[in-house]
Every structure is written in C-alpha cells, then in structure tokens.
Image (cartoon, helix red, strand yellow):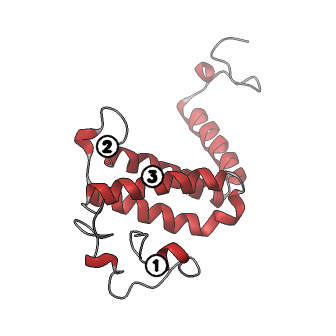
Amino acid sequence: MSDQQQPGGIDPSQMSEQELRAAYEAQLEEQLKQLRVEDVIVQTIVTLVNLGGRRAGLAPGTEAERDPEQLRLAIEGARALLGLIEAELGPDGAAIRDALSQLQMAYAQLSGGAGGEPGGGEGGEPGGQPPQGGAQQGGGAGPAQSSGRLWVPGQ
C-alpha cells in the first residue's frame, strides 16, 4: 500500500476526477449520516466562546481585536444555543458555563460596567434593564439575576 493510498485500498492518484468527486461525496454522505445536530451546536458554542475570547482581548496578542459589540453577540449566541442542549452536556456543561461567565465579566469591564452599574456603557441597556420586548429565556431568572446584581447580555 502506498503512502497516498486510503484505507480500503483506494489510491487517489489512480482515480479520475469524476471518481474522486464521487468518492468524496460518498465519504461526506457517510459523515453526515453519523453527525448529530447536538454535535454541531456544541461546536458552534465552542467557536463562539473562542471568538468571544479574542473579541474580549483575553488571549495574549489579541488586545487589538477588542470589540464589545462582537463580544456581546458571541455571548448571546452561545447562551441561546446552550439552552438547547445544556441537559445533554453533563459535566462538560460546567466548563462551557464557566467560559461564558468569564466572557460576561470581560464584557462588563469593556463596556464600563465594572465597579459601576451592571450593563452600563456600550451594548447594554442603562441600569441593566433588558431590552424592550425581550422575553425571558431559559426558564426564568435565578436569584443573582433577579437581584439585579448579575447582568446578562440580552436579558
């Protein structure tokens, strides 16, 4: 078997373009059969958290990429998706929630909310109030949210 040969005895160098395309499509079809929507949602959440970290300037060398509005969108998107699959995450859910908490704290600092009013500054409503027409998601506010001490983007 050559270095180029694929498992199953397929040698791409001996195939026509049409045969390569058909083999690729068959492989893609098999991957799609095995893929679950939950897997895509988890990967999207992880991508949003990672991108949010960059937009928060948390990673060394990303300070110039700070963008509070992009950070807010990353947080809100990840939180919305997390609500769809949180029950299925098990212990991994804690790590994702922790990462989101770190992003929320970074957002509060970037938007001027640190040490002041929650939600003050860019992207938040004055006084930490939810935007008009914003329905409560995720089954209601917890004690920290109800007390007004925890600002959550989009709520």
Looking at the image, which residue is at 33% across and 60% down?
Answer: 108
Closer mark to the observer between disc 3 and disc 1: 1
Left or right side of 148 for 144: right
Looking at the image, which residue is at 54% across and 53% down?
Answer: 98
Left or right side of 143 for 85: right
Which residue lies under the disc numbered 3?
102
- In this view of the protein, which residue sits in the foreground, 55 or 14? 55
Residue 27, given in percent of the width and then of the height, sits at: 66, 41
Residue farthest to the right, as pictured: 8
- In this view of the protein, which residue sits in the foreground, 94 or 116? 116
In the rendered structure, which disc, 1 or 2, sits on the residue that comes first in sequence? 2
Whether residue 37 is visible, yes or no, is yes
Looking at the image, which residue is at 44% across and 64% down?
Answer: 77
Pointers 3 and 1 in contact (CB under 8 A)? no
Which residue lies under the disc numbered 1?
147
Pointers 2 and 3 in contact (CB under 8 A)? no
Residue 39, given in percent of the width and then of the height, sits at: 64, 54
Which residue lies under the disc numbered 2?
57
